[in-house]
Amino acid sequence: MSFRRTGSDANCEGESGFTGFLRSLLAGIPWRERADGEETIELEPPSGGVLRIHNANGRTRLCGEDRETIEVHASKTARAETEEAAEALLDEIRIATAEVGDALELDVEVPRKWNRRGHANLEVRLPRNLRVEVIAANGRVDVEGMRASVAVRSSNGSAILDDVVGDINVATSNAKVSCSCTCGRIVARSSNGKIEIDAHRGSVDASTSNGLIRACLQAVGKHGVNLATSNGRIALELPDPVDADVDIRVDNGVIRNDRTLCQATRETNGRVRGRLGTGGALIKLRTSNGSISLR
């Protein structure tokens, strides 16, 4: 592992006067000095086919590839009151691994003190067919190129998934969810964040608070579509043709429907129901304080 130090100027010999006075004031301030390092490890895939990652502070990026092993690259950063303390903390940031049941667990361990902080950004390259579970806080999660189920839990960080074939279960708080070029069943939850789904084939169950939901589907799965938000709008674009039953309701807002519904009914309380094609999977859209568009 190598590292480089950044922070205040190292060449302070002969400093005097105002500059020296400032340095004396700054000495010992928490997080004043910084150390950076890189580490790469290679792991055998778990026999149970599940990789579980915990990263409390830092970005996590997973890339599914045609490969046999798991490569984990960590970019580490440590901040402390002195250069020596930052270097010591950097050495203590480590990637811990353990076999737990059918899963390989990977945990970023960062010692914490009131005057020291550290984190690690992870880039993980892994076989496409591994099932993946990621738990993160204060960091964005990116997943791409997987051909198995993916589960992501993130707080204060976005979850971005691209080119995933397999069921997706994703939840964020104070951040957005984005899925593109995906196939399978999506279950997405967010608070104070928007949900965007593009070029998806399959079922969708998505809900958020204080955010919009926008979904563009190339095919509707057997479990249908269920979109719900409060204080936000919903925009759903469906393929043509499509067979589905439609149920749309708003509490305070308008419904804009560009599709021809058979046996359509419109109620005065802001509800539209009907059938697309021969009917089938249920498309259920709900919002309060927002509009709904069906295209």
Image (cartoon, rainbow, N blue to C red):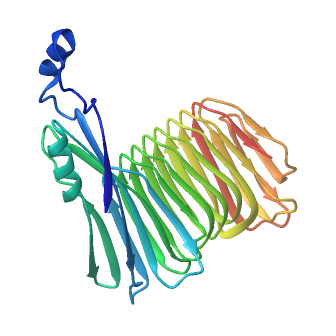
- Looking at the image, the residue that sits furthest to the bottom is 47
123, above or below 35, in the image = below
| Residue 167 visible in this rendered orientation of the protein | no
251, above or below 135, in the image = above
Q: How many labels does the image show?
A: 0
Drawn side of residue 108 relative to residue 75, left or right: left
Residue 30 spot, x, y in % from top left: 17, 32
Please give the name of the residue rendered at 31% of the width and 74% of the height, measured from the top-left corner: 105
58, above or below 49, in the image = above
181 or 279, nearer to the observer = 181
Drawn side of residue 24 relative to residue 174, left or right: left
Residue 277 spot, x, y in % from top left: 86, 63
| Residue 243 visible in this rendered orientation of the protein | yes
Residue 233 spot, x, y in % from top left: 63, 36
The N terminus: image quadrant:
bottom left
Please give the name of the residue rendered at 64% of the width and 42% of the height, measured from the top-left corner: 249
181 or 291, nearer to the observer = 181
Please give the name of the residue rendered at 50% of the width and 35% of the height, measured from the top-left corner: 210
Residue 281 spot, x, y in % from top left: 70, 66
Q: In which quarter of the image is residue 49?
A: bottom left
